[in-house]
Amino acid sequence: DMTKLWGGRFTKATNKLVEEYTASISFDQQLAEEDIEGSLAHVQMLGECGVIAPEEAEQIKQGLLKIKEKVEKGEIQFSVEHEDIHMNIEKLLIDEIGPVGGKLHTGRSRNDQVATDMHLYLRKKISFLIQLLEDIQQAIIKQADAHVETILPGYTHLQRAQPISFAHHLLAYFWMFERDKGRFKDSLKRVNLSPLGAGALAGTTFPIDRRRSAELLGFDDIYPNSLDAVSDRDFILEFLSNASVLMMHISRLSEELVIWSSQEFQFIELDDAFCTGSSIMPQKKNPDVPELLRAKTGRVYGHLIGLLTVLKGLPLAYNKDMQEDKEGMLDTVATLEGALQLLAPMLETMQVNTGKMRQAVQEDYSNATDIADYLVNKGLPFREAHAIIGQVVLYAIQHKKFLLDLSLDEYQRFSPLFAEDIYETLQPKQVVSARQSEGGTGFTQVKKQLELAKAVLGGK
Ligand code: ARG
C-alpha cells in the first residue's frame, strides 16, 4: 500500500474498517499545535547536530510553520487515511516542501513523538487549569469578605450541629482548591520531562542531542531511560487522579448549592443567568449547573479507571493500547475547563439570603454545646455537663421550646450553676464568636483566615 507512509512492506491496501478502527486523527488533531512544536524543536536539533543539513532543517522549519498557520486558520482537512496527527502532518509537510520533508522523522519515532505531544499538551492545560482555579478562589474570597458575620447552621450528618460563619464555610472550599492547585503544580515536575529522542524504544543510531531538543521545548529534564520514556503514562494517570479529586470537591460544593437553593433551605439564590426553567412547571427555577457539575464528576472518575485498566499488565514498550490514553485525557480537560469557567461567575453572582440563615440558627438547638461549655466553665467535668444538657434539650423539645426560651427557673432545675448570663452565652452571634481557637469559626479567626487566603492568592 504505497499511499501510506509505512506502505513499503505491504502488498495490499488496508481494510477500510481497519483504517477507521485504528485511526486516532478524529481526536488527536487536538494535539496539532504540540505536534508541530515538537517537530520544530526536533528538526532544529537535527540541523544543529549535523544529522541533516542546516538548509534542510530550515526548509522543514518553514514548511512546518506554514502548516501551523493553515491549521490555525482551519484550512486543513485531516484524513483518516493517514491515521493520526503525526502522519497527517508529516504527509502535509512532504506535500508542502517535497521529499526533503521526509527527513523530519530522522532519529525519532511516533512513539517518542506522541509522548512528547502529550507532555506538552498537559503542561499547557495544567497551567491554564491552575489559573481557572484561582478565579474560583477569588470569587470565594469576594463572597467570604461580605459574609464574615453571616451566621448559618453548620451541619454534621446533615443535622444542625453548631452555628458558623458563612465565610468560614466558603473558605473551606478555598483550601480544597488550594490543595488541588498544589497537586497540579507538583505534577508538573513529572509532566515537564522530555521523552523526545527515545526513538521507538531503544534510542537511535544518529548523533542526536536529546538535551537540546528538551531545552528548546522548555522541558526541565529528559527521561533517563528510552523504554520508560515511550511507555510511561503515569503523568496522564496523575493528571486524571488530580482531576478526580478536584471534581469531587466541585461536586461537594455543587451539592451544597443545590441543597441551599431548595425551597426547604432558601439559604442562597443562584442568579437567573445560571439556572433554567421547566418545560411544564412554570414556577420552577432549577439549579442545572451545579447538578451537572456534580454529575460530570462521574465521567472524570471513569477516565481515571479506564486508563488505569488500559495500562494494567501492558508489556514494555509501546503498545497500540496506549492510543486509548487520549480521549479520556482530552475529555477530562474539556470537562474541567467547562466546570471551572462556570463555577467562578456562578459563585460571584449568587445571592445570599442572610435572613433565612439567621432564622435557621434561631430555630434550632445548635447552641447546646455552648451550654455544656458554660457549665464546664463553672467547674463541671465536660462529660457530666454533656449529660445534663442532653436532659435540658430533651425537656425543651418536649415542651416545644428552643434553648433561649427556657426560663432561668427551668434551667436551675437541671443545675444550680445556671445564672442570668446563660442567655448572652446562647445568642447565635456569641456562640460563633466564642470559637476563637486557631482555624475556628470565631469572627476574628475567620478574618485572619481570610487575610491568609488573600496572601496565599496574592503571593502568586
Ligand atoms: N496514534 C498513536 C497513539 O496515539 C501514535 C503512536 C503510534 N505508534 C505506533 N507504533 N503505532 O498512540
Image (tube, helix red, strand yellow):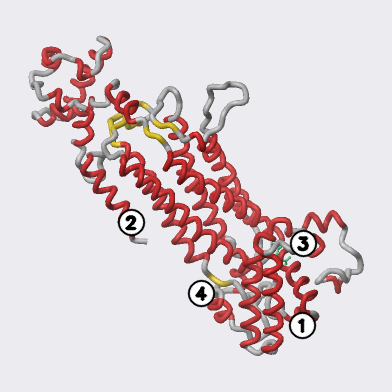
Identify the amino acid type marked 3. Answer: Gln
Depth-wise, is mark 3 or mark 4 nearer the camera? Answer: 3
Q: Residue 173: where, in percent of width, then height?
A: 39, 44
Find numbered disc 3 in the image and state the secondary structure of the residue it sits on.
loop
**Residue drawn 32% across the image and 24% down it:** 360
Depth-wise, is mark 1 or mark 3 nearer the camera? Answer: 3
Q: Do the residues labelled 3 and 4 touch (CB within 8 Å)?
A: no
Q: Which residue lies furthest to the top in this view?
A: 399
Q: Residue 456 carries which label?
A: 2
Ligand 1 - quadrant of the structure image = bottom right
Q: Nearer the viewer, residue 413 or 213?
A: 213
Whether the residue under disc 4 has CB within 8 Å of ligand 1: no
Q: Residue 356: where, in percent of width, then height?
A: 34, 26
Question: Label 4, on which residue?
Answer: 221
Depth-wise, is mark 3 or mark 2 nearer the camera? Answer: 3
Residue 335 position (above or below residue 96): above
Find numbered disc 4 in the image and state the secondary structure of the residue it sits on.
strand
Give me the C-alpha separation between circle 1 and circle 3. 22 Å
Q: Residue 19: where, in percent of width, then height?
A: 82, 58
